[in-house]
Image (spheres, rainbow, N blue to C red):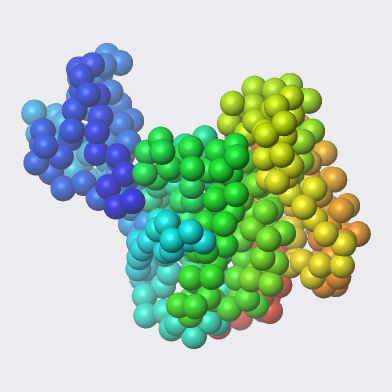
Amino acid sequence: MQVVVAVGFFAGQRVNLQEKYDYPLQGSTYAIVDPAGGADELWLLTSTWTAPSRILSTGRGRLSDTGLRRNPPPSGVPGLEALEVEVPSHDGVMVPLALVYPKGLALDGRNPTLLDGYGAYGFTTQAWYDPRRYAWFERGGVLAFVNPRGSGAHGDAWHRAGFKATKPNTWKDGVAAARWLLTQGYASPAMLGIEGVSAGGIFVGRAVTTAPVLFAAAIFNVPLMDLVRFETTANGATNTGEFGTVAVESEFKALLEMSTYHQIRDGTAYPAVLLVHGLNDPRVGVWHSAKAAARLQQASSSGKPVLLRLDAHAGHGIGSTMRQRNSLLADEWAFLLWQFGRASLKQP
């Protein structure tokens, strides 16, 4: 995951940028101004886990740093470290996992830790920097990003290894990443949270229903919870190529297995859960979160809260205002710190 994209289009031609310009590129690299679209030169945005994005230019036939930066860090924030590893999954397959945390972190299991995963459509979580994360890092927090099967971390074969009938690999890879974080001392079950967004609802929901003892809390963000009924919705019908259709017996069985709602069991001690949804979501209907919230409240024996956060002015997250995004992130992290016993305003 170190150099995710080092290829761009220059004058309509696909070019390996590192070879063409002999310039070191780290992290993720994206074309933001492309000559193929009529511009005079190619501009690139680079992003790493720990440093603000750089903007590079191919002006005068060479790749150079413009000196422009996006989102510089606030003053007085902790220094950061990033670690990229591969961890063994249930079947021995090695799964990419990236961690970002404050420098000098003690591996004593006491660090608030959030594991994030998606694992669908061949989408890969790439290195990116967000200065808002310092609010988490200032409390000694760890952010972990896993690319389970179903993502595109190792190409099309990796995507199809978490696809329809092979979908269980997606959440089993997530469980394996969680176990690795625990055994390495980054977190303990009392300090580990897990999150998934949209199709990542399968990742987080089935990880929680498969291994609830590993997690103190979970965030389901505009999540797919009922895969059996999803196909009956307008947007669900367009996603049968990714998840399967109830009209084919083998695919129906796969949908039932990946459907969190149908895998919730009575009398199970589930972690605390925060379900987040916009009432105007055109992609994943709000009923997914509402059904899952009601079922978890009925089934869980842990006594931990199952909360439903609804926004009447939001949809699937795309197009949300900066205020909405910041408010949601604050609520999510406050929820996690509350469940980790770190809700005090005083820093550790």
Rendered position, 108 above or below 82:
below
Q: Position of residue 91 (x, y in %)?
A: 48, 59
- Count every numbered label the image shows and give the total: 0
Residue at 37% in and 80% down:
104
Left or right: where 101 falls relative to 25: right
Residue at 58% in and 44% down:
167
Q: Quadrant of the C terminus?
A: bottom right
- The answer to which image quadrant residue 10 occupies is top left
Left or right: where 235 falls relative to 15: right
Residue at 14% in and 29% down:
59
Rendered position, 281 above or below 209:
above
Residue at 65% in and 69% down:
215
Rendered position, 338 above or below 309:
below
Q: Position of residue 92 (x, y in %)?
A: 43, 61
Front in this rendered view, residue 3 or 208: 208
Front in this rendered view, residue 53 or 166: 166
